[in-house]
Image (spheres, rainbow, N blue to C red):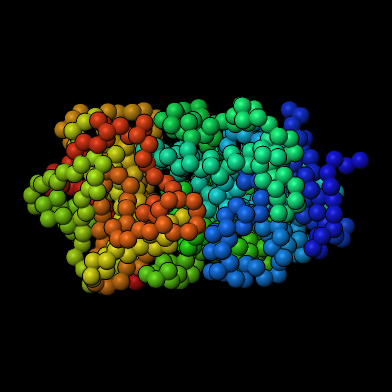
Amino acid sequence: MADYRSEIRDGMHIDWDVPIEMDDGILLRADVYRPIREGQYAVILSYGPYAKWLHFADFRAESWKRVTDRFPEALAGSSNRYQNWEVVDPEKWVPDGYVCVRVDSRGAGRSPGVIDPWSPRETKDFAACIEWAGAQPWSNGKVGLSGISYYAMNQWQVAALQPKHLTAICVWEGSADLYRDVSHHGGIHSSFLSTWTNTVYPFQHGKGTRGQRSTITGDWIAGPETLTEEELSANRVEVGDAALKNELATDEYWASRHPDFDKITVPLLSCGNWGGQGLHTRGNFEGYLAAASKQKWLEVHGLEHWTLYYADYGTNLQKKFFGHFLQGKDTGWDKEPPVKLHIRHPGERFVPRDEQEWPLKRTKWTEKFLDARALTLADTAPAGEAKVSYKGFGDGVTFMTPPLDAPLELTGPFAAKLFISSETTDADLFLIVRAFAPDMRELTFHGALDPLTPLAQGWLRASHRKLDPIKSLPYRPYHSHDEIQPLEPHEIYEVDIEIWPTSIVIPKDFRLALSVRGRDYRYPGNTPPVAGIRSPAWTGVGPFQHVDGRARPTETYGREVTVHTGPQHAARLLLPVIPG
């Protein structure tokens, strides 16, 4: 007798809690949504910790409301009974000849074991699930991966293992480097992973009857067994604690979780978000550029990181991609440009544009020089030496251009070179690229996870200033993060700061600005709580804050920092200006 339950429901044959045995005997559990008619079909698979029996609306009610309010089309053509956070809706895929497989990762939801996010063990399990799906009688042997955020991030990792049935991946807003993209921005510890676990551990396998019932199946989301709190604790790795403990990118914890991009050869579609600062931007560009795949495409959009995925735009884009590679259909994908950008304008207006490469070859890399005396950004370095200081935990200083005499498109990565000194042996630098209207009201956007997002952000801990000479580019400094180089107090140091890519057409008469701060960006206007991802208030950086005092002690990072400018200290911001 099968160790799972099957039924025909809403036009699909659904297998609930199908066991997939791992090499150590652990049985992971998967739901399989497939066409009723017998046959062999392409597979769309997702593997992750957000509990496959937890309905989207039960997990993120306000996020689901935002999706359906902004894009009512997400509801069309589906009963929406099987909606699950950040993965495809099977009712929109099964009728087109796909099998949708959702796997609860080890230790999460219905799958037993120790939950250890992004670990080599988890990646090995993921590969095994792909191979299992590719060998089933209902499979045509071709497996594609799709999902947002976590379900995208782990695609880079598993693709590097090259499971033979893996045929194509769609990485929708997923970081490629857990250290640089998530845990330590520029070497500065982010407290995000410590709070992120609140979205995972409540649905850890073993919550059982002390957990939550599923509105999808009526059964326990994180069961069937019920474990004690002590047993649950023993069955999870505290990723927040591990992030705090492992300070360098070369620590075994991070190195074991970093994909070998030279081994990623599968066709890929990398879909990024201009406004995903702190998690959902950098990785899509870096992964796209680093992967060895000969067939790869980059798409970049805006708005929240979950809405377009469920909208017709995201569904149709993926079906065009997967239809070509998994089903062998003439979808027209072979005529798609390598790069598709949605160029951002004020007012949440986006203009799609096809491109041939990233960064754009026609970019006019333009330097703007900082002047500490006048607090300006200018075309030439100031004639005299000057300096300006700010408190290490303060709002810092802002350098600004005169009003623009014509619209200015900035699309691409930014970089800054600063000359700084500190009262102490270190300094944390937060760089914010901003724009201001003629009335000096700041221009912000609805980012992936915060409705008050500035144009772009970059970070650097000065003691992590060491560059990788091979990977660094003039427009994208790459820090090795393999050693700590303390500062001599009051000595001047040259530092290069990576600023994550963005796109904006700044209108005439607006001003461009760069803020150098000692703490996270905070929108200067009214910042009431906004419904959506769990956060007490929105300030411009969402949950990706750097506020853990254990990683930023006041005696080191709360003292005075000085920015030096002038002919001998030509501090500057490099802009990706797109002509015309």
Residue depicted at 41% across the width and 57% down the height: 529
Residue 203: tell me if it is visible.
Answer: yes
Q: Is residue 518 left or right of residue 546?
A: left
Instruction: Give above or below for 144 relative to 407.
Output: above
Q: Residue furthest left?
A: 384
Quarter-wise, where is residue 244 in the image?
Answer: top left
Image quarter hosting the C terminus: bottom left
Q: Is residue 263 left or right of residue 112?
A: left
Task: Judge by depth and name the residue closer to the eye, 517 or 221.
Answer: 221
Residue depicted at 29% across the width and 39% down the height: 428
Task: Judge by depth and name the residue closer to the eye, 161 or 136.
Answer: 136
Image quarter hosting the N terminus: top right
Instruction: Give above or below for 61 relative to 115.
Output: below
Q: Position of residue 554 (x, y in %)?
A: 27, 33
Q: Position of residue 257 (x, y in %)?
A: 54, 35
Task: Judge by depth and name the residue closer to the eye, 123 or 188.
Answer: 188
Residue depicted at 49% across the width and 51% down the height: 534
Count of numbered circles on the image? 0
Q: Is residue 304 left or right of residue 293?
A: left
Q: Residue furthest front?
A: 210
Residue depicted at 26% across the width and 47% down the height: 517
Task: Judge by depth and name the residue closer to the eye, 67 or 206.
Answer: 206
Instruction: Give above or below for 305 relative to 50.
Output: below
Q: Position of residue 248 (x, y in %)?
A: 41, 30
Q: Position of residue 231 (x, y in %)?
A: 64, 27
Instruction: Give above or below for 290 relative to 253.
Output: below
